[in-house]
Image (cartoon, rainbow, N blue to C red):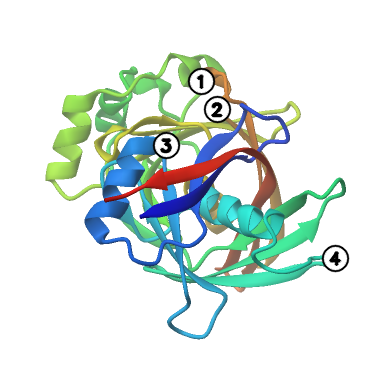
Amino acid sequence: MAYRYFTCDVFTRSRFGGNPLAVLPDARGLSDRQMQQIAREFNYSETTFVLPPEQGHTRKVRIFTPAREIPFAGHPNIGTAFVLASTGELGKIEDEQTVTFEEVAGLVPVTISPAGNDSFRCELLAPRGLTFGPVVSAELAAAALSLDTADICLDVHAPQVAGVGLPFLIVELQDPVALARARFHLETMTSLNETGITPDILLYVHSSGDAHIKARMFAPLDGVPEDPATGSANCALAALLSHYDSAASAEYNWRISQGVEMGRPSILDARTKKTDGIVEATWIGGDCVIVCEGVITVE
């Protein structure tokens, strides 16, 4: 049976930048095994499979890395909404419109805004509030990143597992030199995983340039040695930074640069709302561009 697919680059306005994504706009009839095989064939960070809704919303969306299905991710939601809008699957969009995807992590609203030249900018609302996991020692985090303990910054928070639908170990580094020097250490990340700590690591530094934050993300145990743009991880980072800010109530905005070290520069715009000490909502958005389309045959 033949299935139509599109690929797009997410969190960029330039083709061959950002994070590539494969989208199957109508995945009806595919088994779990076939979805995993297709995701492995594309070998992108994620591939999405779009299905009719089961709860009365816009679509059901399943997200697969080359290794497994995951409950939520950022760039797959942004890219899927963009592809559905660009190919007419959602009808003609002339004004801002919000679609809602049904996913394992919950409902994911995505706002689609016309951006001129028949393009669209998309922004998602994370499906869950900020959740915390274990704190990891600076020594262990450094080992997982092939860095020295002195490269880990502890001024705001220790290496901390946090998420808004998908957990990441979030590690602040001292400077851009350490960020560029980091390499994942597979044995240490495997040991983290065996103790129940997520081995998917977002490392970042604050920046005074065009972006407020520069980030990288390693997830080799998910088949993603490095990710060019990770919406779910940067959503978690934005929520975490909001949580640790001293203001009880505020709204925050961050422009985040990722993927530069891979030659796939990406820009992600994150924002949060905090009320009475609680991070109520986290959003992340960006631009996309269609790269190719075709048909994949599944027997």
| Residue matched to label 1 | 262
The residue closer to the viewer here, 190 or 69, is 69
The residue closer to the viewer here, 28 or 21, is 28
| Residue matched to label 3 | 44
Q: Residue furthest bottom?
A: 56
The label shown at residue 169 is none
Q: Earlier in the sequence, mark 4 or mark 3?
A: 3
Q: Residue at x 19, y 29 (%)?
A: 188
Q: CA distance from mark 3 to mark 1?
A: 14 Å
Dot in front, 3 or 1: 3
Looking at the rendered structure, the kind of residue marked 2 is Gly
| Residue matched to label 2 | 259
| Residue matched to label 4 | 94
- Rendered image quadrant of residue 208: top right
Looking at the rendered structure, the kind of residue marked 1 is Met
Looking at the rendered structure, the kind of residue marked 4 is Glu
